[in-house]
Amino acid sequence: MRVAELGAVQAPLTLTERPTPEPGPGDVLVKVTACGMCYSEVNLRNGEYPFARFPVVPGHEVTGVVAALGSPHDLRDTLAFAAAHGILPEVTPVSLDQAPGILASMAAGTARGRGVIAF
């Protein structure tokens, strides 16, 4: 997989290849489609965390697509857990056959939530 890696304090991000992890039991592998950097990553780059180890792949604010599930796994259980803990407050889980209609409703402004996870 391709990652944006920070190699050292004040270094620029560089695109690097890393092995794609295999999801373990109960894990979800997410193919990240967009990632934001918050101020904690800016502080990391600026050297404000003496405990930091480099190289590091910054960014914990992501959107993406479920690429693989560890076995045994039911994605609905993961979504229920995440929603119960406020991790996915703006996401609507749908089945793949429902996705086109839901996306059209979201574009029209008539669907609940700002994101869709299809399973």
Image (spheres, rainbow, N blue to C red):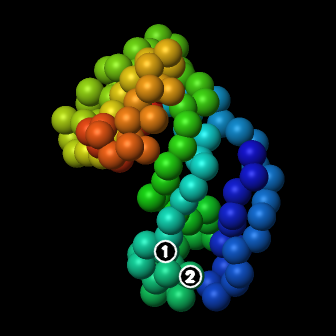
Q: Is residue 88 visible?
A: no
Q: Is residue 54 visible?
A: yes
Q: What residue would you read off at disc 1?
A: 41
Left or right of residue 109: residue 22:
right
Three-letter residue code for mark 2: Arg
Mark 1, other Cα within 10 Å: few <14 / some 14–19 / many ≥20: some
Left or right of residue 20: residue 110:
left
Q: CA distance from mark 1 to mark 2?
A: 6 Å
Left or right of residue 116: residue 87:
left
The vertical placement of 51 against 2, above or below, is below
Whole-percent x and y of residue 87?
Answer: 29, 45
Tag 1–tag 2 contact (CB < 8 Å): yes
The vertical placement of 113 against 46, above or below, is above
Q: What residue would you read off at disc 2?
A: 45
Left or right of residue 65: residue 87:
left
Q: Secondary structure at mark 2?
A: helix
The vertical placement of 93 against 111, above or below, is above
The vertical placement of 103 against 49, above or below, is above
